[in-house]
Image (spheres, rainbow, N blue to C red):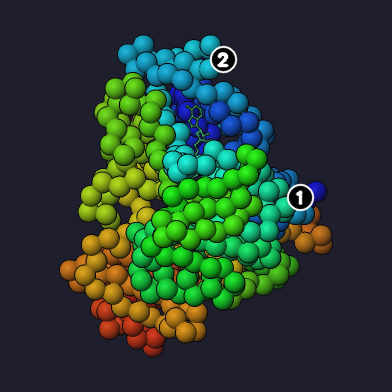
């Protein structure tokens, strides 16, 4: 099982074990990670699952689709090059640990 | 045992408990729910779950570890049957009594039943819970002809899932257009056409007066016009009713739901309500509304959780909703009732457009079909009280983001 390290803006962290079939958003919601709402359950409708993937790892997860890019275009927290919707990210088998940063607010 | 007691373990109930914890509430928290499942997602029940693309595993929202970590006692499979506000006690159906310092009523809503003769026949279904969905899915697999009573969100989503699985589907809607209260005519028409193209027949302005059966099982429906439609499965989706009975019986003010303020507080100092069962005053509605959406349940419950922990964060989010049918992504932000002008960006012919709604020159809502970028911009503009002119909204070369950027500059 891989792990996701959720880092909050105040530096606090939560490490969560994650199976290969569930998304980073779902892992966050199931474990009560603050600041990730995941309202739509991952249907690319809500954009309340915005995270920043650790810059060094941004290239290790598959790129966003058109819809994801459109949703990211107007998220409330600053949009950065490593901004992603965490419901679209599953952990590739090549990674043991993914580090994501939780933004200050969701849309 | 006292502390916080929550009735209902779905979006609103769990969010209120979690927000209270996060804001430092240190006492006991007990959540009672009459369903036996761990908290799960309802929206996929009419969508991916029926289609088989979302499995039971993926429905679960919060697992045992969550409750352990957050120190929340979860009591499943038991129903609260009485609230005594003076004694601060909840009576549960297993004869247990729970004492509370603070109470959250998050009992949600239930499917409105139809009263036509034959409504009790086997094969007449409703969709609210995962148990309903498991049953519906099994029946759908066996069915050939499906009649959907009600062209609302749940009816249309089930129609889409059933048509995708190759069933003959007929939707019977009593109004003159689909989703009449929720979306504008252009969106209704677009969805109608999409259903038609997928082989779904939609009958408008028709009501079901009887459900016909043979040997206790449904065999068809009779419409007011006299038309008879054969059916081996009937799904009724004619709206929801707030589960406010417990609160009413306890003397808490209810008018189409439990009446709450911007902190989710009822007329009783220590009793809160949130989600589908609550009615609140919304500046986006210019009045009182009871909303049935995940966003409303979560955001209202956050406000209640904060207030319970002695913190402050009133509910003031722009309402939003979504619906997925076939490959159509419908997203709605704001409440369009009372609009006096619309502007359309994109075109229905391309299957991608947004309708912007204005009242007195102010942007109040937007319905988007397959234009998530517009929807996100509209969300932020409405929240900030900024309006593009209708001409700007219609002009595809006008960058809505430029106005959003202005908000960011103001906020810096
Ligand atoms: C099929 C379907 C599709 C939907 N699709 C969407 C969508 O696409 N987008 C969207 O935003 N919303 C959608 N919704 C609406 C959304 O699911 C609801 O708004 C949301 O679930 C409301 O959450 P809640 O916590 O207020 O209430 P609920 O989810 O209704 O939960 C209330 C819980 O309390 C329990 N309860 C009730 N009374 C008692 C009692 N006396 N004692 C103990 N327990 C009790 C109930 O059994 C239930 O488990 C959909 C709903 C359904 C049914
Ligand atoms: S959870 Fe809704 S877009 Fe990711």
Q: Looking at the image, which is closer to me, B378 or B355?
A: B355
Query: In the rendering, at what x and y percent does residue B268 appear?
Result: 29, 25
Query: x, y (%) of residue B59?
Result: 64, 47
Q: Name the residue located 54 percent from the left edge and 38 percent from the top edge.
A: B120
To which quarter of the image does residue B216 belong? top right
Up/down of B360 relative to B62, above or below: below
Say whether mark 2 is within 8 Å of ligand 1: no
Check the image and report above or below for B174 versus B29: below
Q: Is residue B222 or residue B350 the one in the foreground?
A: B222
Q: Quadrant of residue B78?
A: top right
Label 1 environment density (alpha carbons within 10 Å; few <14, some 14–19, many ≥20): some
Residue A95 shows up from this direction: yes
Q: Looking at the image, which residue is at 35% across and 79% down?
A: B344
Judging from the image, mark 2 belongs to the subunit labelled B
Q: In screen coordinates, is B412 left or right of A19?
A: left
| Residue B94's disc number | 2
Task: Answer yes or no: disc 1 within 8 Å of ligand 2.
Answer: no
The percent position of residue B384, horizontal first and vertical second, equals 30, 63
Please tell me which residue lies in front, A14 or B96.
B96
Query: For mark 1, what is the residue?
Result: A19
Of marks 2 and 1, the one in the foreground: 2
Please report the residue visible at 41 percent of the width from the left and 56 percent of the height from the top.
Answer: B224
Residue lying farthest to the left in this orientation: B360
Q: Secondary structure at mark 1?
A: loop
For this view, does B363 lie left or right of residue A4? left
- Residue name at image x 48 percent, y 70 percent: B191
Q: Residues within 10 Å of mark 2 (few under 14, many from 20)?
A: few
Residue B80 percent coordinates (x, y): 48, 22
Q: Is residue A87 left or right of residue B236?
A: right
Q: CA distance from mark 2 to mark 1?
A: 37 Å
């Amino acid at each position: 099982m891989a792990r996701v390290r959720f880092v909050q803006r105040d530096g606090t962290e939560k490490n969560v074990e994650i199976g290969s079939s569930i998304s980073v958003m779902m892992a966050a919601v199931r474990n009560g990670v603050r600041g990730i709402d995941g309202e739509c359950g991952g249907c690319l409708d809500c954009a309340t699952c915005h995270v920043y993937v650790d810059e060094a790892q941004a290239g290790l997860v598959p790129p966003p689709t058109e819809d994801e890019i459109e949703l990211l275009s107007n998220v409330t927290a600053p949009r950065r090059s490593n901004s992603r919707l965490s419901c679209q990210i599953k952990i590739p088998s090549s990674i043991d640990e993914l580090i994501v940063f939780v933004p200050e607010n969701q849309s | 045992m006292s502390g916080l007691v929550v009735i209902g373990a779905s979006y609103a109930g769990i969010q209120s408990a979690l927000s209270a914890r996060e804001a430092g509430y240190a006492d006991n928290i007990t959540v009672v729910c009459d369903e036996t499942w761990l908290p799960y997602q309802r929206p996929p029940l009419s969508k991916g779950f029926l289609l088989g693309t979302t499995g039971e595993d993926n429905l679960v929202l919060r697992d045992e570890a969550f409750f352990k970590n957050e120190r929340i006692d979860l009591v499943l499979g038991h129903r609260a049957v009485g609230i005594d506000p003076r004694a601060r006690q909840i009576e549960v159906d297993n004869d247990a009594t729970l004492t509370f310092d603070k109470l959250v009523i998050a009992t949600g809503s239930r499917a409105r039943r139809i009263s036509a003769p034959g409504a009790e026949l086997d094969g007449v279904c409703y969709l609210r819970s995962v148990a309903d969905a498991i049953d519906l899915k099994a029946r759908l697999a066996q069915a050939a002809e499906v009649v959907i009573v009600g062209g609302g969100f749940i009816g249309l989503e089930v129609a889409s899932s059933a048509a995708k699985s190759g069933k003959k589907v007929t939707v019977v809607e009593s109004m003159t257009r689909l989703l009449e209260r929720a979306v504008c005519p252009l969106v209704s028409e677009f969805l109608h056409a999409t259903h038609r193209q997928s082989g779904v027949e939609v009958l408008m302005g028709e009501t079901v007066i009887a459900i016909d059966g043979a040997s206790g099982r449904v065999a068809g429906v009779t419409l007011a016009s006299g038309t008879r439609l054969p059916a081996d499965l009937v799904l009724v989706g004619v709206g929801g009713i707030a589960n406010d009975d417990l609160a009413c019986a306890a003397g808490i003010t209810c008018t189409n739901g439990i009446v709450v303020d911007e902190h989710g507080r009822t007329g009783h100092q220590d009793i809160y309500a949130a989600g589908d069962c609550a009615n609140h005053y919304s500046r986006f509605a210019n009045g009182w509304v009871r909303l049935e959406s995940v966003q409303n349940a979560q955001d209202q419950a956050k406000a209640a959780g904060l207030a319970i922990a002695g913190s402050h964060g009133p509910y003031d989010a722009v309402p939003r909703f979504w619906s997925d049918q076939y490959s159509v992504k419908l997203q709605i932000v704001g409440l369009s009732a009372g609009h006096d002008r619309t502007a359309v960006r994109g075109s229905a012919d391309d299957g991608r457009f947004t309708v912007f709604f204005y009242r007195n020159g102010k942007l109040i809502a937007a319905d988007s079909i397959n234009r998530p970028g517009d929807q996100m911009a509209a969300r932020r503009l409405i929240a900030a009280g900024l309006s593009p002119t209708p001409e700007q909204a219609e002009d595809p070369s006008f960058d809505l983001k430029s106005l959003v950027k202005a908000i960011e500059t103001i906020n810096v």
